[in-house]
Amino acid sequence: QKQDEVAEVLSMLTREGMPNEKASRQLKKIGEAVVAMKEKVQVREAQIDRLVQTHAERYKKKIQEFLAELNAYGAGLRSEGYYFYKSGLEQAFGNLDSVTADLDEFDRRMDQLLHIAKNFGYPEDISKPRVVMKGLREEVGMMQ
């Protein structure tokens, strides 16, 4: 866009009779360099596209594995000692603190996966783990 504005100013100066051949040549050279750079970028993007797709698929699998791990952890929570009040109050609170720390670690991992998913263009894949995490947090919250 700026290049077009400069070209217009140079053509206006030419119409007014002011010499500007040097500036026109420089502008033409810059335009050619920009076009050449855009072509190189397209070639490079084509070269790395397969790598990007491979990594995107790898992280989609990691998100699915994370969801499965969350579901398994959630199923295991129902067998924790604090769930049945058999372990005593102090131990129950200790267990709840441990579970909360685990959930915090899951949140941290989920945030990392969300960042990666956003960069690869599929942030919606994190929606299911978010729902599971919300349910786990509510369940632990009710037990406290």
Image (cartoon, rainbow, N blue to C red):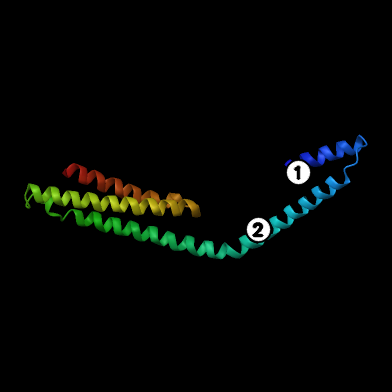
Q: Position of residue 60 (x, y in %)?
A: 43, 59
**Relative horizontal placement of residue 55, taking residue 64 as reference (left or right):** right
Q: Residue at x 81, y 49 (%)?
A: 26
55 relative to 106, above or below: below
Q: Residue at x 41, y 62 (%)?
A: 61
Inspect this view and state whether residue 61 appears. yes
Read off the residue under disc 2. Answer: 41
SS at badge 2: helix
**Relative horizontal placement of residue 36, taking residue 63 as reference (left or right):** right
The residue lying furthest to the right in this view is: 17
Q: Compare residues 70 and 93 and report the one nearer the observer.
A: 93
Distance from label 2 to label 1 (Cα)?
20 Å
SS at badge 1: helix
Read off the residue under disc 1. Answer: 3
Q: Position of residue 50 (x, y in %)?
A: 56, 65
**Relative horizontal placement of residue 133, taking residue 1 as reference (left or right):** left
Q: Compare residues 25 and 40 and report the one nearer the observer.
A: 25
Sequence-wise first label, 2 or 1: 1
Q: Which three-letter amino acid code belongs to the residue tagged 1? A: Gln
Q: Position of residue 73 (x, y in %)?
A: 25, 57
Q: Which three-letter amino acid code belongs to the residue tagged 2? A: Val
Q: Position of residue 122 (x, y in %)?
A: 47, 52
Inspect this view and state whether residue 1 appears. no
Quarter in which the N terminus is drawn: top right
67 relative to 90, above or below: below
The residue lying furthest to the top in this view is: 16
95 relative to 6, above or below: below
Quarter where residue 17 is shown: top right
